[in-house]
Structure formats: structure tokens, C-alpha cells
Amino acid sequence: MRLLRIVPDNTKFKFVWFRRYSYPLSAAYSVLVLVLFMTVGLNFGIDFRGGTLIEMQVKSGQIEIGQLRQTANGLGFGEVEVQEFGSGGEVSMRFALQPGGEPAQQQVVVQAREAFGAAYDFRRVETVGPRVSGELVQAGTLGVVLAIVGVLIYLWFRFEMPLAIGAILGTLHDIVLTLGFFLITQLEFNLTSIAAILTIVGYSLNETVVVFDRTRELLRRYKSMPIPDLLDLSVNSTLSRTAMTATTSVLSLIALVVFGGTAIEGFALVMLFGVVVCTYSAMFVSTPILLYVDVRSGRNVPVEEKVAADAKARV
């Protein structure tokens, strides 16, 4: 029985040629990310900023956002962010970090229940004090940095230096583009976002290793093939696998976005963007980088070719 092939076996798409478009696009996006990071910044969630997040659902009738905001601001805890979400009369309120430590944060919850408990059901309450939020920032940053450093070290030892350079730059490229997604959409950046970034790093690593393993194999097999043709062959020969992986991942993530609810929606959206970026990066960013490094440097000629060459020289 013939196996399912999303991509024909004899595909000869010129991936390397498209670097003249993919590189300027990625460069422009990276500059935009830098500008937004310096001017707008990330929309840090309560995990990192501290404060109190309350999600409620109205018991009956419609939500009066204006009246709700006025009542929340009148509690005396500063400006309160009030936002309606979902389709079932759900609303979230975000109170700023209060001076006075943990007892002050708990007082916010107590007064909010007194003010809104009669008309709303409290679905979610999160309170993070200044000490805890500071620890989370340090631990989250350290975790991301150590994970990325570990991945880069693995890539350095996994491949020869030219291939490792391409893999490292491709992984960093995917991280920058993912941060750009947070900056452009102003999606809340919290501990779940860190988990999404680390997952995307792993996905990017997987995509790159598959293509570069085939590149290394073809370098041994075709000693005289021009590098652009060899790189195109590497991507084309793994294209069916890449398409299957990306398609199944995207379908699963779309299901999570649509049916997963608000608790997992942000994670699923970031992962959906990350899968698209990693697939694009492996084909149009990481692989063409090998054109600018000597991928055949230091590569030993097999023993059989040496013997044949010596015999031919003696003749």
C-alpha cells in the first residue's frame, strides 16, 4: 500500500534562492522587535508585576463595564484594569501592587468580594506580593537563559562548527520573532509564556537538527555538488516530514485555541505562531546561512576515495 505523501518525492523547490526575501523580512521584523521592546515593552502579567487578578462571571443580566470600573476604582486601590472577555458575561479586574506586603494584597480580595459578590461569581483569584513577583522574575529569567545556553552548547557539540553556527543563529532568530509576537499583540507575558518560549526553542531545535542531519549526510555523499543545490536537496528531501509535523501541530494548537478556554488560549496562540516561525526558519533562514560558511572545511575524505585516488595517481 502506498504511503501518504503530502509533498511529492521529486520536489525541487529552490529554498535557498528565497533568502533574498526571507533575510530582509526577518531583519525588518527584528528591528521592529527592538524598537517595540525599547518603547512599548512587554505586557508583564501579574506573575512578574505583582498585584491581584480577579475573574468573575455575572450571575444574571448584562455586564455594565462602566459601572463596574467606577465601583472598582472607588475601592481606593488605584486605577483598576477592567476587561470583558469570553462570551458568557465574564470580566477580569487587575489591581495594582499595593504597599504593605501580603496582607495588603489580601485586603484587595476581601473588599472586592464585598463589593461584587452579590452580582458576580468569583471564578479565579490570583494574588502575588512584591517579594514573590521579584523571585518569579529572577527564576524565570534564569531558567530561560540557562535553557538557551544549554541548547546552544548542545548544538555546538552536535554539529561541526559551520552547521552549529547555522543552527544557533536559527534558534536565536526564532526566539526574537516569538518575543516580537508578544510585543505586537501585547499578549500577557507570564510564567506560561516562558513555558511556551522554551517549548518553541525545543521545536526549533528539532526542525533544524532534522534538516542539518540530512545536509551532513549529503555532504558525505556528494563531494562536488554545488552548495546551493545540496542545501535545496536537504530541505526538499525532508519536506514531507516537515509538512506532516507542522500540519499535525497546527491542527492540535488550533483546537486548543478554539476549545481550550481562556486559561490556555495565550499559550496555544504563542505556540501556533512558534510552529509557523520555526518551520519558516528551518527552510528559509537557518539553511541558507550555510552558504556563508565553509561547510566542507575540515571534512575528511573517506578511506575508499583515498585509496582510489592513490591508485589513480600511481597509474
Image: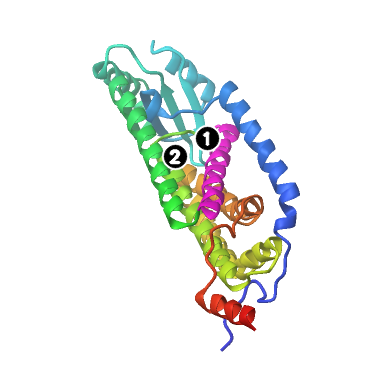
Residue wearing tag 2: 193
Q: Residue at x 61, y 81 (%)?
A: 314
Q: Give the amino acid at mark 2.
A: Ser
**Residue numbers of the magenta segment:** 161-186
Query: Where does the C terminus fall, quadrant-wise?
Result: bottom right
- Position of residue 263 in the picture relative to residue 254 (left or right): left
Label 1 CA crowd tier, 10 Å (few <14, some 14–19, many 20+): some
Whichever of labels 1 and 2 marks the residue nearer the N terminus, that label is 1
**Callout 1–callout 2 Cβ contact below 8 Å:** yes
Query: Where does the N terminus fall, quadrant-wise?
Result: bottom right
Q: Residue at x 36, y 24 (%)?
A: 52
Horizontal and vertical percent for residue 158? Answer: 44, 57
Horizontal and vertical percent for residue 42? Answer: 51, 28
- 191, 116: nearer the viewer: 191
Q: Residue at x 43, y 18 (%)?
A: 72
- Is 178 magenta? The answer is yes
Q: Predominant secondary structure in magenta?
A: helix
Q: Secondary structure at mark 1?
A: loop
Q: CA distance from mark 1 to mark 2?
A: 9 Å
Question: Number of labelled discs?
Answer: 2
Q: Quadrant of residue 296?
A: bottom right
Which residue ends up furthest to the bottom in the rendered image?
1
- 209, 84: nearer the viewer: 209
Horizontal and vertical percent for residue 256? Answer: 48, 53
Horizontal and vertical percent for residue 37? Answer: 56, 27
Residue wearing tag 1: 187
Q: Is residue 62 visible?
A: no
